[in-house]
Image (spheres, grey):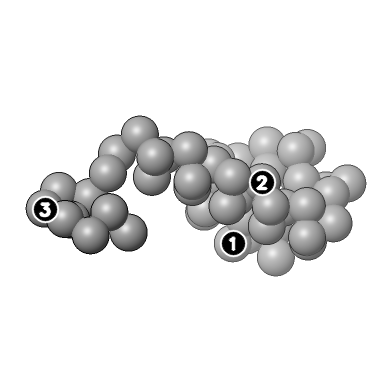
Amino acid sequence: MPAILQKLARHAHISTTMSFYVSLAADEIGADLWSEHKKKADNNPAIGNTAHN
């Protein structure tokens, strides 16, 4: 749903969201979101996580 993607991407205007995601399939969007999440998680490990998971 575009409104959910807008919130996840923190776009101020729905037109920004639509210009980036309107031509992508749901699987592609999900892959992009998980890829960005992994990049951020790799750069910011959890504090006090001794199991490294």
Work out how far the residue at label 1 is from the one at label 3, CA to CA, in angstroms: 32 Å
Taking depth in this image into account, of 39 and 11 the one nearest to the observer is 39
Say if mark 1 contacts mark 3, CB within 8 Å.
no
Mark 1 or mark 2, earlier in chain: 1
Which quadrant is the C terminus positioned in? Answer: bottom left
Q: CA distance from mark 1 to mark 2?
A: 15 Å
Of badges 1 and 3, the one in the foreground is 3
Residue highlighted by disc 2: 32
| Image marks 3 and 2: residues in contact by CB distance under 8 Å | no
Q: Which of disc 3 and disc 1 is earlier in sequence?
A: 1
Left or right, 28 with reference to 51 = right
Is disc 1 in contact with disc 2, using a CB cutoff of under 8 Å?
no
Mark 3, residues whose alpha carbon is within 10 Å: few (<14), some, or many (≥20)? few
Q: Residues within 10 Å of mark 1 (few under 14, many from 20)?
A: few
Quadrant where the image shows the N terminus: bottom right
| 16 up-or-down from 22: above or below | above
**Residue sitting at the far front:** 51
Q: Residue drawn 29% across and 39% down?
A: 44
- Residue 33 lies, with reference to residue 2, above or below; the image says above
Say which residue appears at 52% left-offset and 53% top-offset.
8
Q: Nearer the viewer, mark 3 or mark 2?
A: 3
Report the residue marked by disc 1.
Answer: 4
* Whether residue 53 is visible: yes
> In the figure, residue 35 lies in which quadrant?
top right
- The amino acid pointed to by label 1 is Ile
Checking the image for residue 40, the label placed there is none
At which x and y percent is residue 29? 72, 52
Label 3 belongs to which residue?
48
